[in-house]
Amino acid sequence: MAKLALLGGKPVTTQKIGPMPWPPRSESTAEALKQVYLSGQWSFNSVEEQAFEKEFAAYTGAKHAIFMVNGTVTLEAALAALNVGPGDEVIVPALTWMATAMAVHYVGAKPVFVDIEPTTLCLDPEKFKQAITPRTKAVIPVHLLGSMAHLDKIIATAKAHKIAVVEDCAHMQGGFWKGKGVGAIGDIGSFSFQQSKTLSSGEGGICLTNDDELADRLYRFKHIGYGRGAEQGGAKAGPPEGLRCHNYRCTAFQAVILRHQLKALPKLMKTYASNVATIKKILTGVKGVRIQEPGAKATQQGYYNLAFIFDSAPMKDIPQDTIIAALNAEGMACGGTYGPVYKHTLYNALPSEYRIAGGSCPVAEITGTTRTVTVSHYTLSNSKSNIRKIGEIIKKVVTNAAELKDYVPATK
C-alpha cells in the first residue's frame, strides 16, 4: 500500500497548511487611517510620509529614505539618479521578478542577465565579474526569496570597475548584513511594499542612500522636480539638467500602514527565524532536499519565501510538478519560482534589447526554476505545530520518493 497521499496513502494533515491572512490589519491602524483621512493631509510630502521615511531609514541605518509609489519606480529612480541611460548596460541576476530588468529598459539601458549561485539563488559574484564590459554602468544584486546576494564580493568588484550598486531589496524587509540593514550598503537600495511583501501597504516603495546628492536627485525624480522642503507650488530651484522627473509620489495612507507594521517587524523576523530553524532541524540528514542558504554574512535573514531545492538523489529526477502535487496532497500549500526573466510570459523585450552573459544561465534555468519549490513568508507565520508539519511533509515525500518514480498525473 502506498504511503504518499498522492497515491492513496494517509496525508500528514487534512487541514491545508497555507498562507495566514495577509497583509496584517488592526483596529489601531484603521483608526490612524481615519484620522489622516479627516486631516486632509494625504500627499505632497505629508507629515506621515516624512515620519515613515525617518523611521525606515533609522531601522536600516541609512542616512536618507525617499518614499515612492511602488518598488518598480524605485528601481527606475535609482538608475536615473545614477545617470544610467541609453548605451549603458546594467547587470541583473537571471532569476528575479521582471521589474528588476524592466527598470533598466525604462531608462533606456540594456539589462545583462547573469547566472545565480546554486546555494543562495542570488547573483553569482564570479559570473558578475566575468560579465562586465566597458558599457557596464551599474549592477542590481537582488536579495531573493530567503537569501541575500554576497554584497562584500559584489561591491568590491563594482568599486574596482567604477560600477554603481543598486540593491534590490523587494524581498528583504528586515534583513541585516554584518549588522547593517540591506539597502543601506550599496549606492542605493530599493524596496517594494506591494500587497504580498513582508511590509505591505498594497502598493508602495522606498529608496535608501547615504549620499546627499543622490538623495536630492531621487527626491526630485519622484516629485516632479521639487527639492525636499519646497512647498507645493513654490519650487525655489529646478532639477539638475538631464534628470527627467516624474510624479511617483506615494501617500500618507500607505505611510500610516507601514509605520504601524514597522513596529512589529523585529518580532516578525524572530518568528520567521524560529520557524525556519524548526523546519531545518526536521530535515537534518534527509537526502534529496536542501534549503536555500541564507546570506553568507546575514546577521538577520529576511524571508519573502522559504525555498526548498530538490536537486539530488532520490529527488533529482522527479518532475517539479509531481513534487508540488505530492506536497499538496499531504496538506502543504507551495509553488515554484519566477523562472528566468527572459523566459517569463510577461517579458516581451526583443532579444536585441537585452543580453544573456555567456549565452545561458543554467543554474537559474534548472536549479532555480525546475528544482525549487517555495512557501510564502506568510505561511511561515503559522503555528509551531503547523510549521513542524511542513517539515514532516517534506521529509515524508522525500523519504518515499521511490513511490513517485512512475507517477503520471491524471489527464482531464
Image (spheres, rainbow, N blue to C red):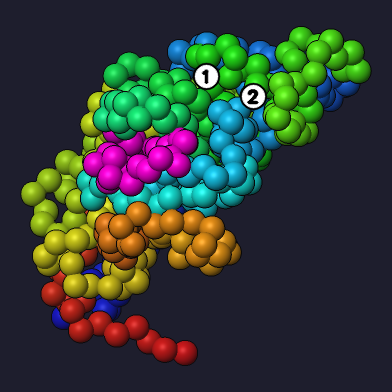
Identify the residue position indicated by label 2 in the image. Answer: 218
Q: CA distance from mark 1 to mark 2?
A: 9 Å
- SS type, badge 1: strand
What's the mark number on residue 60?
A: none
- The answer, for residue 326, to whether it is visible in the render is no
- The answer, for residue 340, to whether it is visible in the render is yes
In front of the other: 222 or 25: 222
Q: Residue 283 at what x, y percent from top left?
A: 16, 48
- The residue range painted magenta reads 123-151
Q: In the image, what residue type sits under mark 2?
A: Leu
Q: Crowding at label 2, few (<14), some or many (≥20) Cα neighbours within 10 Å?
A: many
Image quarter for residue 232? top right
Identify the residue position indicated by label 1 in the image. Answer: 209
Q: Residue at x 31, y 42 (%)?
A: 128
Q: Residue at x 58, y 11 (%)?
A: 212
- SS type, badge 2: helix
Q: In the image, what residue type sits under mark 1?
A: Thr
Q: Residue 182 at what x, y percent from top left?
A: 41, 25
